[in-house]
Image (cartoon, rainbow, N blue to C red):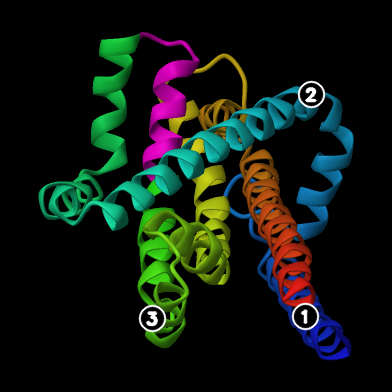
Amino acid sequence: MKGSWKRGGRSFLFLLFLFILWEVLVRITQTPMWLLPAPSDVFKEAMIGFDNFYGHLLSTIYLAMLGLFIGCSIGLIISIILYRLPKVNEVLYPLLILSQNIPTIVLAPLLIIWFGFGILPKLIIISLVCFFPIVIASMDGFRQTAPELKHYMQMVGARRNQIFWKLEFPHALPSLFSGLKIAATYSVMGTVISEWLGAKSGIGVYMTLAQSSFRIDRVFVAIFFIMLLSLLLFGLIRFIEKMVVKGRKEAV
């Protein structure tokens, strides 16, 4: 725990140094705000314009959390099906890989044409971004279960379902949480991309309006909050992981 705080402190100091360097360079070169604002200008805009930004922030948080939940749930279900049914795995696994080679920026307009400008196409985009890390991480976790433990359970008469739910699934939890942390960081960016292509509110909408009016300080406000949301979601998943995995180890 002490080591984690120490590493976090070093990262914070380095980040602070980068902001100070950025501030100094902008002031020395007298770079105009519409080209590159100083961190102090970005912070000032975040404080002054937060009332206007607040609604967009809530909209993005809601959409990201909902899309993350749906995408991770679908990913976990798919991973279980593929692991438990090898023949289905042979057919669907290549298709899952191909689905990740379709650029989101190309797929999003088609989803809007097919499903309109409601919440459904946005959730599909976020789910497509989030489910694949869950599938890969979960299946790797299932496969890495110690063979001698599986053999022991078979010797004592455990059925296939019992082996999976009592041994393989708990053993895969660390890998599952690794996938969840990746998906959590992707979910925010997937949400912003979906908002770019048609939404009434959200950080993506706020960023688009800021770009069109050359308010680069507001663009950086949006970027910083995207990074902050990604870090917070990552930290939340990591906290849950420590509680669940620690509790499982203590129970064992």
Left-right relation of 94 to 237: left
The kind of secondary structure element at disc 2 is helix
Between residues 154 and 77, which one lies in front from this camera angle?
154
Indicate the quadrant where residue 48 lies. top right
Q: Quadrant of the N terminus?
A: bottom right
Marks 3,2: beta carbons within 8 A: no
Dot 1 or dot 2, earlier in sequence: 1
Identify the disc placed on residue 17. Answer: 1
Return the mark for residue 52: 2
Compared across the picture, whether 93 is left or right of 115 comes to left
Q: Which residue is mark 3?
A: 151
User: Magenta span covers which residues?
Assistant: 116-129
Question: Residue 122 in magenta?
Answer: yes
Residue appearing at x 51%, y 57% in the figure: 165
Residue 215 picture location, percent across and down: 63, 36
Residue type beneath disc 1: Phe
Mark positioned earlier in the residue sequence (3 or 2): 2
